[in-house]
Image (cartoon, helix red, strand yellow):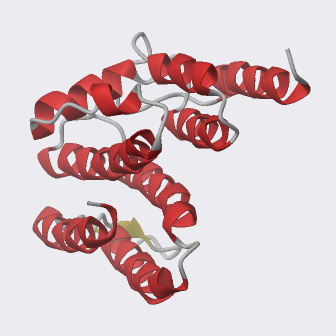
Amino acid sequence: MSITCRLTIITLCFCAFLLHPLLVSSAELRIAPIKVYESILTNFKEKKYKNVKTALTFIEPIISDINTRFGIDLNPELTTRDERCYAAIKRLLFYDIQRIFAIISMKEEKDNPRVLFKMAYADYCLLSLEFLSDEAYFAVDKKIRKMFAKTYLDLGKESPYGKKIHPDINMFKLHAEEIVGELSKVVL
C-alpha cells in the first residue's frame, strides 16, 4: 500500500473520532462527509478507483437521501471510471448543498442551523475548486461566495452587546434558492 493511501486512511480514521457528522445520525455515518468528498476527488484524480468505491460506502446514507429526496440515481455514474463519475461527484456535492438547505428550511435537524450551513459552505468550497480551473468561473464564484455570506446572516446572530437577531427562515429559503440556481448553471 502506498504512503498516500495510508495517509488517506489514517486521516479518515482520525477525522471519524474528531468530527461529528450532523446531517445523518452518527450511527449511520462514521466520518465527516467533507473529508470523504475530498478523498473521493483526490483518489479519482489519481485514478485510484478502488479507493473511490470504498470512500463512497462511508457516505451511502447521504447518497440514498439525495436519491430519494431529489428523485435521481447517482449510483450508476459514481461506479464508472470515466468523466461521468467525475461529473457525478460534482453533482453529488451540489445535491448535498441543496439537501442541507432543505434540512435547514424544514428544520429537520435539532442541530444549530448555522453549523449545518457551514457544512454546506464547506461543500461549496470543495466544489468551487473543481470548476475554478476555468477562468470564466471566477466571477460566478465571487458572486456565489457573496450570496453565501448574505444567506448566513439570515440564520440570525448574537451581537457582543447581548442583542439577538432572530433567524428569518423565509429570507433564508429565498437566498438559498438563489444560490442553488447559480450553482445549477455551473454544475448541471
Q: Position of residue 53 (x, y in %)?
A: 51, 20
**In screen coordinates, is 2 left or right of 93?**
right
Residue 178 quadrant:
bottom left
Q: Position of residue 119 (x, y in %)?
A: 46, 49
Image quadrant occupied by the C terminus: bottom left
Q: In the orientation shown, which residue stands out farthest toward the front? A: 82
For residue 142, above or below residue 72: below
Horizontal and vertical percent for residue 108?
A: 18, 36
Residue at 60% from the left image edge and 30% from the top image edge: 19
Name the residue at 39% across, 49% down. 87
Q: For residue 85, which quarter of the picture?
A: top left
* Quadrant the N terminus occupies: top right
Q: What residue is drawn where x is 70% and y is 39%?
A: 46
In terms of depth relative to the viewer, which is nearer, 60 or 73?
A: 73
Say whether residue 40 is left or right of residue 101. right
Q: Position of 178 compared to 140: left or right?
A: left
Q: Residue furthest top?
A: 27
Residue 97 spot, x, y in % from top left: 33, 51
